[in-house]
Image: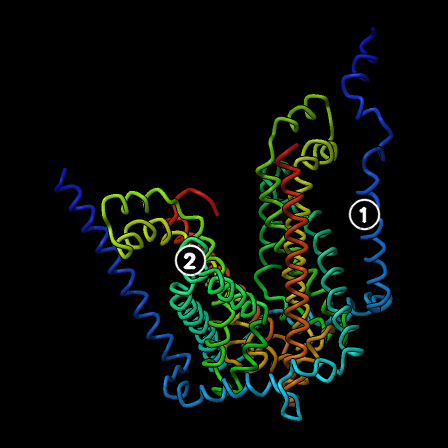
Amino acid sequence: MGLAYAQAMVAKRRQLWLGSMVLGVCVLFSGHIAEISFSKFFDNIGAFTSYIGRISHLENGQWVVSDPIEWFWGWKKWLPLLGQTLLMAYVGTLLGALGAFIFCFFASKNVTASPGVVFVTRRLLEFLRTVPELVFALIFVVAFSLGPLPGILALAIHTTGALGKLFAEVVENADMKPVEGIIAAGGSWLHKVRFAVLPQVASNFASYALLRFEINVRGAAVLGFVGAGGIGQTLLEVIRKFYYADISALLVLIIATVMVIDTVTEKIRHRLIGQSVAS
Amino acid sequence: MNKHEELRQRFSLKFQPFYYGHLRAIAVAVAATALFFYGLLSLEMSVARIMGGIGELGRMVVLMLPPDPGTWTRTGIYLYAMLETLAIALLGTFTAAILAFPLGFLAARNTTVNRVVQFFARRSFDTLRGVDILIWALIWINVVGLGPFAGVLALAMSDLGIFGKLFSEAIEAADERPVEGILSTGGSSVAVVRFGILPQLLPVLLSQVLYAFESNTRSASIIGIVGAGGIGSILSEQIRTVEFQQLSFVIVLIWATVSLIDLGCARLRFSIIGARAL
């Protein structure tokens, strides 16, 4: 028995070494390709700390927190943009969730009988979520012209792909006994979905959609980098033009908003999931 | 008593009008819908504009087909850019994981006794996570210049925030019993970490790192838009120069690579943590 143990340990060690070596080679090779240069990093690391220093000081050299009114001088311009960003995330999430809701039943083996339909729907959802939303935004900006519209559509499309997969997984994990009951009572496909599956999955759907909303708020904040609306455009501008105090002010606004949204949605999600466990 | 009456008594709630006990839910739904339509209006989403855009999009899609890289030299350039993207993703994830491993212990409630240290570690991770990768990229470009190195650092920063949170949560969720066992046999604190916590932790952490690598491949393919290396720079250039066939080739390339990485990571994850979960 001692021998078997020793052998098993040797095999495990060998696997570990092999894995580490493969990883090591990959890392070194990547370091070469990505032009990693420690000398450049340590020569310029001062630039990073001084950058942090500059964005935390006002133009008159004062520490930013000493004069919040001066620091957030552009709030009249920024808050509506922040609101627009949130609204974009909201509308995009809702549209995407709607799309995901429609597609997810066709991507679930237990609700849709035809394997062909399931396969095609799954590949479609996969395509929608693997292509980054910023790529969609870049293309939509050309087609729909600048503004929040292309951003919302990009968010919605990516959300459809991401939520569609999660929704389908929830549906596939649903209890099939109610479905069999509906079939036994002679219900149609729609009856099956509406009265057997939906009551089981609705709270999970809502919870996932809220989680996606959180992610989309972050996403919407940078969509402006490619001209697709929201606060990102202003942020890009102040970064490119070196308005240091404005950079920190906008970052603080965005981070605070994201944190508030995270906390609120997390509370709601706990209640939603708690309900589904209780009932 | 007839059957109907009996049912009515047993499920009295089901026989109420549908809005009974759902008033709050209905109010929320109405408010959500109203906000949605307000959003449509205030964000200039008119039907005419959407229809016009869809027509334009249709013309663009026709121009994109079939995906064609142009010449072989260009194919080589695209493939190298994709390789660079993968390199950025790998190094960013790797650096963040190495840094987050010790810091995760600092932010975990059961390994860091000092509440203040733990609190500040948590908040620092939140801040790192709150700043988007693209913004980190812009900041690092100021430090190390344009190119993939800035992308690696940007990914590492925002991943450090994610890993810090996930690792510390995993450490907090670790089972206490092996730790107690080692303590009761007189093990040192190093032995506690090595034999009590690490064996529980490593598979979970590895699977999280692999998962992050997947999503980083996606992120790395867009940070080039702001000049931080990878295939994103080619994407935005092709849109500006209206090279739609090459653009669609690059999009297909990104899609294929990300799908492959997803597949590979899913299999690795599966073999690491076995049948349970994810």
Which residue appears at 83% of the width and 13% of the height?
Answer: B4
Decide: marks 1, 2 in contact (CB < 8 A)? Answer: no
Q: What residue type is labelled 2?
A: Val
Mark 1 Cα shell of 10 Å, populated few (<14), some (14-19), many (≥20): few
Mark 1 vs mark 2: give the one in front. 2
Quarter of the image with the N terminus of chain A is top left
Q: Give the left or right position of residue B190, taking residue A270 as reference.
A: left
Q: Position of residue B15 (x, y in %)?
A: 83, 24
Which of these two is toward me, B111 or B83? B111
Residue A216: x %, y % from top left: 66, 62
Residue toward you, A7 or A192: A7
Q: In this view of the protein, can residue A218 be seen by the observer? A: yes
Pinpoint residue B37: horizontal percent, then vertical percent.
85, 58
Q: Residues within 10 Å of mark 2 (few under 14, many from 20)?
A: few
Mark 1 highlights which residue? B29
Q: Residue sitting at 18 percent across and 51 percent down? A: A10
Q: In this view, does A235 lie above or below A194?
A: below
Quarter of the rendering containing residue B83? bottom left
Say which residue label 2 marks: B113
Instruction: Report in which chain the residue with disc 2 lies.
Output: B
Visible residue check, residue B260: no
Say what secondary structure mark 1 lies in.
Answer: helix
Seen at 68% across and 77% down, the residue is: A250
- Distance (Cα) linking label 1 and label 2: 45 Å
- Label 2, secondary structure: give it: loop
Q: Residue A74 has which mark?
A: none
Q: Which residue lies furthest to the top in this view?
A: B1
